[in-house]
Amino acid sequence: ESWFPADTPPIPSVLATMPNPIVPDDTFQWNFTLVSGTFLINGLPFDHNRVDHVVLKGSSEEWTLANDVAAGNWLHPVHIHFEEGRIMSRRVRVSQNPDVFQDVPLLPEELGRRDVYPLPAQHRVVLRMRFRDFVGRYLIHCHNMNHEDDFMMARWDIVNSVEELTRRRMEIDQRRMLAGLPPQYGPDKLRGLV
């Protein structure tokens, strides 16, 4: 004899099903590093006046979040403002060789939509997002309070037109080259937009 009444109606074994993953229009990688005590994203410290990535409203992208910071073995809970995404894969570096990674099975709690992505040291997370509703300025940042306070963040924007997207991405590449950094997009990726 049970003290608890039976569920009425019974709870189904599957509460919800996820739609098929979106097919991305483009790819991008965010590299989180620590250089001489300063957190950098894609090789640069935070500057609220600088845009580090631009996407087109209505498009979708596959982003790789790469935590190559071994110091302190920090897990960075990376928060992406504006839109939820879905983790597609997680990889961990398995040797000192920077290019040798091993797939890690996703945990059940990583299978749904989210806007914060746990990123342990030497891990890479691949996620997909759709930029549906608004244009504007947004942030990607670490939710560890001392890292956020030390500006472990970057600005990214959503724009309305391919022309603006192309112009802004060219500006980002030119600014990076002037700073002695490699371009993020390069001529092949920009040529496909024009």
Image (tube, rainbow, N blue to C red):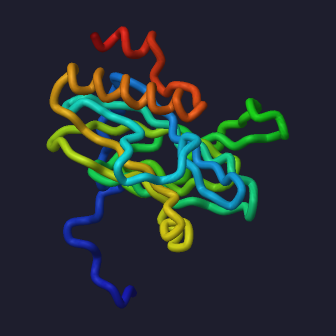
Image quarter (top left, top right, bottom left or bottom right) of the N terminus? bottom left
- 107 vs 138, left or right, is right
- 29 vs 80, left or right, is right
Say which residue appears at 25% left-offset and 38% top-offset.
Answer: 158
Say which residue appears at 30% left-offset and 50% top-offset.
Answer: 138
Q: Position of residue 189 (x, y in %)?
A: 42, 15
Q: Position of residue 96 (x, y in %)?
A: 84, 40
Image quarter (top left, top right, bottom left or bottom right) of the C terminus? top left
Residue 120 visible in this rendered orientation of the protein: yes
- 138 vs 64, left or right, is left
Q: Which residue is outermost to the right?
A: 96
Say which residue appears at 51% left-offset and 41% top-offset.
Answer: 30
Q: Quadrant of residue 185?
A: top left
Q: Quadrant of residue 181?
A: top right
Relative to the observer, which residue lies in front, 112 or 23? 23
Q: Position of residue 130 (x, y in %)?
A: 28, 37
Say which residue appears at 26% left-offset and 65% top-offset.
Answer: 10
Q: Quadrant of residue 166?
A: top left
Compared with 43, 151 (above or below) is: below
Q: Which residue is outermost to the front?
A: 178
Compared with 100, 46 (above or below) is: below
Residue 14 visible in this rendered orientation of the protein: no
